[in-house]
């Protein structure tokens, strides 16, 4: 009877199973205590963006309450536009096994916040665990520095921009006056005198001259629209790093703004090719290229523009979009190359540079998942090289030591 009862009863769970469960619960509790003292979020995602688990001290930093997040995809939680770049990164980490770091902005209960996501682990199953930190304060300060650098560059450009605007205004005014004068002559000829028929040959010639003058005036207004449009876009900027950016358009806008400054010192050689769009911000890329162009022109002494060049290149190399700005200026001393991207380091005279431009370029390019490097020889010139990942690009390569 006792044996029969023993055979019919469920055996007690092995002690090892209970111990493992207690260990997991204790580890989970420790993780929540650690996160409770920070603004961190730990989240495990499947390749399709489905949330397997999430740990955080509060729902304030989540786009939806924690209880409703597990089991849903990022697209269901955030919407397709916001979720797509994140899912692409998760899939890339799963396929390559390489760790990744990226920043993004998100609307949460407390308003718009900036976050930094870093890969913690790639588990044996096809999923990725991310540590996400709230970097809103840091990002706010960084954006202020970027805006300050943007305005400093506009100050440097002020004289050349005034020249770029005054030239079209001059011939717009002259052509409009010519057209008005021609129209007055045509009116006089059409009214005639003493019943004399109008001179059709004269009218045809004058009308064609007026048309040409108005067409040149129209071209001048288009040039003004381009200059002022580029300035407006550059001055306004944006704080978004997601979306698709036309690298060639960003490069050309920077060239349009810097052309007046460059022409005083060098000849511009343009080798820009059409390249695929990359993930990023067009305004930020424009700021990078404008800084590099201004640095290139300032490295060349005035008065010898026929002997110096600033060469720009844009193309695709493997999984990268590569942009280059090369000058034939004074070059950078070897002892300065190691510090060239440090904040507030500058080799320019007092009052010429803030020492923030290249540091901000480095920050922007790294934030877009790319790399920026420099090669220079004293007396022969400098080349800055910007590498931006294509959609399927892997983690950027580690740059060679300078």
Image: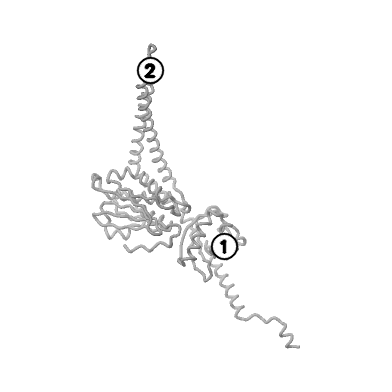
> Which residue is pictured at 60% across the width and 59% down the height?
65
Camera-nearest residue between 9 and 19:
9
Q: Is residue 301 left or right of residue 275?
A: left
Q: How far from the left and from the top, in percent, is residue 11?
A: 68, 82
> Which residue is pictured at 38% across the width and 15% down the height?
197
Judge the density around disc 1: few (<14), some (14-19), many (≥20) Cα neighbours within 10 Å. many
Q: Is residue 279 left or right of residue 399?
A: right
Q: How far from the left and from the top, in percent, is residue 396?
A: 40, 61
Q: How far from the left and from the top, in percent, is residue 137?
A: 48, 55
Dividing the image into 4 quarters, which one contains the N terminus? Answer: bottom right
Residue 191, image quadrant: top left
Q: How far from the left and from the top, in percent, is residue 92?
A: 48, 63
SS for tag 2?
Answer: loop
Question: Residue most toward the right?
Answer: 1
**What is the total number of numbered labels drawn onto the structure image?**
2
Provide the residue designation for mark 2: 198
Q: Earlier in the sequence, mark 2 or mark 1?
A: 1
The type of colouring in the image is: one colour
Judge the density around disc 2: few (<14), some (14-19), many (≥20) Cα neighbours within 10 Å. some
Measure the C-alpha gap from mark 2 to mark 1: 81 Å
SS for tag 1?
Answer: loop
Provide the residue designation for mark 1: 50
Residue 398, image quadrant: bottom left
Vertical relation: 286 (above or below) 341: above
Please tell me whether mark 2 or mark 1 is closer to you in this view: 2
Camera-nearest residue between 149 and 263:
263
Image disc number at residue 237: none
- Whether residues under marks 2 and 1 lie with C-beta atoms below 8 angstroms apart, the answer is no
Question: Residue most toward the top?
Answer: 194
Dividing the image into 4 quarters, which one contains the C terminus? Answer: bottom left
Vertical relation: 272 (above or below) 69: above
């Amino acid at each position: 009877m006792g044996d029969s009862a023993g055979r019919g009863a469920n055996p007690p769970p092995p002690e090892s199973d209970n111990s493992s469960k207690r260990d997991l619960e204790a580890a989970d509790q420790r993780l929540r205590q650690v996160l409770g003292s920070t603004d961190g979020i730990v989240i495990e995602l499947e390749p399709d963006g489905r949330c397997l688990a999430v740990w955080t001290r509060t729902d304030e930093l989540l786009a939806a309450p924690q209880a409703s997040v597990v089991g849903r995809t990022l697209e269901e939680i955030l919407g397709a536009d916001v979720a797509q770049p994140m899912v692409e990164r998760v899939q890339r980490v799963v396929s390559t096994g390489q760790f990744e770091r990226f920043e993004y902005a998100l609307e949460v209960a407390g308003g718009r916040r900036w976050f930094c996501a870093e890969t913690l682990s790639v588990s044996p199953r096809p999923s990725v665990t991310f540590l996400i930190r709230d970097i809103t304060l840091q990002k706010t300060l960084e954006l202020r520095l970027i805006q300050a650098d943007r305005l400093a560059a506009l100050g440097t450009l002020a004289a050349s921009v005034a020249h770029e605007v005054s030239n079209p205004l001059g011939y717009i005014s002259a052509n409009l006056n010519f057209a008005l004068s021609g129209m007055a002559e045509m009116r006089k000829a059409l009214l005639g005198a003493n019943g004399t028929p109008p001179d059709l040959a004269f009218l045809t010639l004058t009308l064609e001259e007026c048309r040409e003058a108005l067409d040149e005036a129209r071209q001048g207004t288009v040039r003004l629209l381009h200059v002022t449009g580029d300035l407006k876009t550059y001055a306004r900027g944006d704080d978004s790093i997601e979306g698709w950016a036309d690298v060639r358009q960003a490069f050309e806008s920077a060239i349009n703004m810097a052309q007046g400054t460059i022409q005083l010192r060098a000849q511009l050689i343009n080798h820009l090719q059409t390249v695929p769009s990359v993930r990023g911000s067009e305004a930020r890329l424009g700021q990078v290229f404008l800084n590099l162009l201004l640095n290139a022109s300032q490295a060349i002494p005035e008065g010898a523009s026929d002997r110096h060049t600033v060469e720009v290149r844009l193309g695709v190399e493997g999984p990268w979009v590569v942009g280059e700005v090369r000058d034939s200026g004074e070059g950078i001393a070897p002892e300065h190359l190691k510090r060239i991207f440090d904040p507030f380091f500058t080799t320019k005279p007092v009052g010429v540079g803030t020492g923030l431009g290249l540091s901000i370029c480095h920050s922007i390019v790294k934030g877009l998942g790319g790399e920026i490097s420099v090669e220079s020889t004293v007396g022969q010139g400098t080349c800055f090289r910007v590498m931006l990942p294509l959609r399927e690009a892997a983690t950027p390569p580690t740059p060679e030591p300078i």
